[in-house]
Each structure stands twice: as structure tokens, then as C-alpha cells.
Image (cartoon, rainbow, N blue to C red):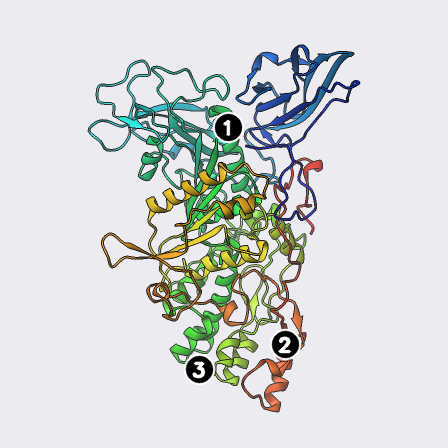
Amino acid sequence: MFSTHRAGRTDPLRNTILAMAVLAVTSVGAQTAPYVMETISTHADRVSGDDVLVKITYNPVGQIGPLWITLNDRDATGQFRPGSEPNTLVGLVRGLAFGSNTLRVRGKIPGGMRDQSLQITAYDIRGPIISGPYESPFICQTASFNLPAGLGTLGAPLDANCSIATRVDYLYISTAGGAFKSLPSTTALPADVAMTTTLDGKTVPFVVRLETGTINRGIFQSVVLHDPTTEAAPHPVFSPPKAWNKRLLAIHGTGCPGGWYIQGNAQGVNPVTGVNITRLGEGWGIFINTLQFAGTNCNILLNAETAMMGKEHVIKTFGVPYYTISIGSSGGAIATQDLGDVLPGLFDGAIPQATFPDSITIANNASDARLLSHYLILQNPSGWTDAQKNAVTGYAGRQAWLDDANESQRIDPVPGRIDFPGYAMATWNAAVPVALRYNPTTNPTGARPTVYDVSRNLYGVDPATGFARRPWDNVGVQYGLQTLNAGVISVKQFLDLNEFIGGYDNDANYVPNRTAGDLGALTRMQQGGAFLSGTGGLSTIPILDGGAYNDTSGHHYAVYHFAVRERLRRANGDISNHVMWRGPAQNEPNWQAMVRWVEAIKADHSNISQHDKVRVNKPADIVDGCWNTSTNPPTFIAETQIFSSQPTTQCTTLYPAYSLPRIVAGGPLALNNMKCQLKPVSFADYTVSFTSDEMARLLRIFPNGVCDWSKLGVNFTNVVPWPSFGPSPDNLIFDVTHP
């Protein structure tokens, strides 16, 4: 459920709850006739499309006759009916104009008429609302998007914004089992239709309504149990789907590299296959959009805007849900957590798997790893043993280190680059024509395939280059500091590494000097939610963190799970809303645990803070632990999770957690210090001795000082919940060109 809210320039604390607009008429003698008007499908200042679900609460005392409701001075009373709460009316108000609208309620009380109005701002369903100017280029892919059950593709788009006509298809599960089939008729059910029993105990035909359309230029789908042979078309007020259990599931895709400038020709997760069939049979509603798939769209602000609009559409179709759970893996874990943080109230529970804090954290560490690969493999391969190389990088081994370094592809726009063996740069989806792609020599104004450039509205644009501003910074970072102090590497190796490690230019080319991050980009990425802080909505919902273990390769390393936990600890003073289950994901136990936790929270109607509700209503058996897969089935070991590569506990023995270059350099486990504050070099910080020449060399390497990790980073700030980057001037929190 949503309430009206206007984003501001402040940094709200975790207990800031989006206040609904409580609008009341003035007192007449001893009699009052208050009206409370609120949009309940989305915030009143960011409605998508030409309709909005509204609740009006009134005081019947003193009322004479019925209420009269108008939209822009046109009668809208007939669109309302009594709500489920006393003295309320709920209506799907249609006919909004794009821009400002006035919804007014009038009532007669002793002494005359009293009225109150609510301003509603509506936007085109094609967007944008909060993400700023359209991403360009943008490749339509409706013609290659396949529908399930042999229903074909969506066909050619209707306009340059990749729109299609919304369609509704019905699918069913057969008594013979298997995947969904296309329902042959909406007037009679086939003889082989299976039955399913929902969480509410309703036994109904296993028939689902699949809606497919375009929202925010992405391909949207929603699914819910609905029998067209016995039910009217869904309406949030007059005819919600009878078997819907009033709960929603938001699902997201994986990936990131290659996720730019395309609409997407498939969902990141198919909403009508796998475990989603189970959820649908239980009565859950499911929604997704191709732009909630990081492999299609690695622009987190566009992802958030799309999910916001998608949930709004579901509410305007089915009704207000009791709660919404979000689940996603890898890039989907980023969406699950980051969207929940930057858009408080969008989700009521989060199940991230193969967790990362955000795409920028991946890019930051990959940038460090790639610099180290350049120095240790290409520049000075014989000056270090393999054990020393692994130690100074922090990874479990060479493969893990190089796999993480390879994630630099998400910030490297140059095609054809030759680097360490196996490196992939400038990753593109084949749908983007080569003629549109950036090439520093042949097409310097082309689209750039980086997490920064695809989100240029968020980071801002450098007018000197036309490229997005970049926040990455390694000024003052003492690479290998912990290994030096542990006696693993020599002073000479330490000095050589830090003198010659260098940095990057805007094209991710190696340069001899360290890289200074853009201060405006640093601020904006945190305020806009591209860098997870945990200070927004994530502090008020339960998080059950799990996922596969692969610290030896890939880049889904345990350290990222712990980084999220540490950010929550800093933001909230505790980690009571964060539970970590290490080892291969156990989907059904994770799911059932989350459902029990959210249900307990929703049943708590006390006045304590939402964060405390999450804490006190956590079921006693939902605790940290890991899965022992040597047994069949896997057994759960209840044990507080700690960050360690040493076998000090049962879980660290099964699942050791290794480090990263920035942590080996002394940085925080939270990985939340993007640009460190500097302090003068102090030789008391080292456990080894320096000669006078080595001291002088260290001072030359770090003339302005070294990182002071005891302090928060430069321009460290919290997320601004429900931010906006346009398109209208009064909605613009940040200028999109300058910091």
C-alpha cells in the first residue's frame, strides 16, 4: 500500500515513514467533518497511466446526505464503493490527464458544504517518472519475445517507444501434470483441468490469467489464479480475483554486463515455470518486467521506476495486497535489496540469493582486481610467488581473483581490448547494432556499455567529455597493507606495488596515476540508491540472505553477503532484520521461513517502530546457519555466521569466506568507503621496519596521505527514499548535468 509523498533534499533517518496526506475540513462549532484522501496504488505525485486507486475516509458524524466526488470538476462518485474499513470509500478513478489533476470530495454538514481536494500528478504509462530523460538508444524486442504455451510472439511494436497492445491469455495445469497449457476457451473449462488449493483453503481450477503489456517501455507480465468461465474481469474494487490470496511476489532476473539500451526479449525469470507454478497454485499474484532483469537493464533507477509502476498496475488490476515479497538471485538480489531500500514500502520482505550489495560495489572491487592483475601478471609476473599474489588480492585463489577482475567488463567501454588472458570487455547484447556502439576511434559519440553511462541521469554528465561522471577512486589506498604487516610480502614489494599500480581514465585504460572519483557522482549514487546504504526501506523489512557458495571461482563470493550485513549494522545499530543461510539455496525452506516472518509482522498492530516489529516478530527458529550438503537431505546447522577463511566454526569449515583487495588494503568489510579520507603517513601503522630510503619513497608515493579507514568516506551520505531525477523541473532532486 502506498501513501502520498513528495521526495525532498534531506537524508531521512531509518524511522522516517512516508506520511500520507491527511486532509481535513475545518471545524464548524463543535462539529467536525474530516476527510482523509489517499492514493493507495502509488504515491499521488507519481501516478502512471490515466487511473489511480483512491481511498477516502470520512467522519459520518454531522454528515447530511452522500458525499460527492469529482475529478477535474467531472463527477467521479460512481467509481467509488464502500471499502472494507468503516467509513471509507474506495474507487479506481479513471480519466486522469497527464500532469496535474484535482480530486475533490464534497459533503454537506450543518452550516453548509465542506470540501477537500487532493492533487494527483499522472504520467504516461511509457514513462519516465523518476528516472530522468529516456535512455538512448533503446532497442525494441517485442517481435522476438515468446509467450508461453506456444502462444507465439508479441509482434512488432506499435510505436518508437516499443509499445504493444495489452493482451490477456489464460493458461491451465492439466491433471496429467507438466507445464501450463493454453486454455482453449474462456467459456468452458477443459475436462483435464487440475484443481489447486490456495493458502486461504479455497479449492479452485488451476487456471491463471497472464497479462502481458508494456510499462515504462519494458515488457510487463502479471499472473494470478482467475477462472474466466465463472468470474468477471478483475477489478480492484468490484471484482478482485476470487482465488487471489491478497499477496504479491516480485521476481527479478540476474546478470548485468550486456544490460544496456535494450527492451529485452525474455523475462529474467519465467513467471509461469518452476517454483512459480507452486506459488501461483497457492494463490499468489506475480509480477515482473524485462527491465527488472539486470541482464537487460543494469540501470538501477530505471529498474526501481519500472518495479514501482508494475506494482501500481497490479494493485489497480487486482486490489491492494496484504504484503509483497521480493526474491532474486545475483543481479536479482541487487534488485531485491536495493529497490526495497530506495523505495520504502514497495516490498515487505526480501529473499536475496547469491547476494551482492549493488552493481557499483562489484565494479569497484573488479577495478581493484583488474589493476592487480595488470601489475602482478603483466608488469611484474616474476617478482611475486603465487601465494603472495593470492594473499595481496585476498581471494581464495587465482581463478577467483581473475573471475572478479573480469567483472570490469561492466565499466570498460572499449571493444577489442587485449588484457590478461580470458578478459572480456565492452560486453554487448547482440540486438544493439554495431553502428550504435561506442568506439573511441571510429564512433566516439556512440552508446557506452558501462554501469555509469547507462545511468547518466543519476551520476551526472561531464560536459568536457559527454560521458557519465565516475565515482571510482583509489587515491591513498595502500594495496597489500595487511599482507605487509603480516610479513607475507616485503617492504620493497609493497612499495613497488603501490608505486606502479596506477589507475584508469574514462575509457578504463590503464594510466600511471591513481584515479580520483568525481565528488558529485559519489554523492548522487548514494542518494539515488545505486549504492546500497541500508538506511531506507531495507531497515524496516526482514531479509533472509542465502544462495550458492562458490568462493573459488565466479564472483558470487561470501564477502558480499557480509558486506550487506555490515552496512545494515552501521545504518541501524543492529542486524536483527538480517538472517544469513550459507550454502546452496534451499528455496522452499527459505520461502516458508520468510512467509512466517512477514505474517507475524503484519499481525502486530502495536505502535512500536517498523524496525522493532521486524525484530520482535522474528520466529525463534529463524536464525543464522548453514546447510550441510553431505547429508541427504541437507541438514541445517544453526550457527551465527562470521566472516573468516579459517575453520573456526562448523560453517566456516564448510564455507570459508575470503577477502577482497580493498579489505586487504585496510578497508571496511562493509565495502562502503568509496573514496577514503586521507591522513598523513604514520610509520607507527606498520609492524615492519622501513629504511630511511624506503620511508622517503613511501612519502613520495602518497604525497597527500593514505586512507584513514576509521572515518566515513568522502561525501558519505544516506539514500534519499523515493528520489526523482525528473522529468518535470519541480520533481527534479538533482541536476542531471552537474553535481
Q: Report the residue marked by disc 1.
A: 320
For disc 2, the neighbor class at 10 Å (few under 14, some 14 to 19, many from 20) is some
* Pair 2/3: label in front: 2
Disc number placed over residue 404 in the picture, else none: none
Q: Residue at x 50, y 59 (%)?
A: 563
Residue type pointed to by label 1: Val
Q: Are marks 2 and 1 in contact (CB under 8 Å)?
A: no
Residue type beneath disc 3: Gly
Mark 2 falls on what kind of element? loop
In this view, the residue farthest toward the top is: 65
Please give the residue where the numbered disc 3 appears in the rendered image. Answer: 383
Read off the residue under disc 2: 702
Task: Please give left or right for residue 220 compared with residue 124 in the image.
Answer: left
Element on which disc 3 rests: loop
Secondary structure category for the residue under label 1: loop
Task: Tell me what residue is drawn at x 25 percent, y 59 percent.
Answer: 630
Of 200 and 620, which appears nearest the observer? 620
How far apart marks 1 and 3 lie (CA) works out to 64 Å
Q: Quadrant of the N terminus?
A: top right
Work out whether mark 2 precedes mark 3 in sequence or the reverse, and give the earlier one: 3
Using the rendered view, name the quadrant where residue 515 is placed: bottom right
User: Which amino acid type is marked by label 2?
Assistant: Phe
Instruction: Decide: is 562 above or below 206.
Output: below
Q: Position of residue 506 (x, y in %)?
A: 58, 59
- Crowd around label 1: few <14 · some 14–19 · many ≥20 (10 Å): many
- Report how far apart the C-alphas of labels 2 and 3 lie in the structure: 22 Å
Mark 2 vs mark 1: in front: 1
Mark-to-mark CA distance, 2 and 1: 57 Å
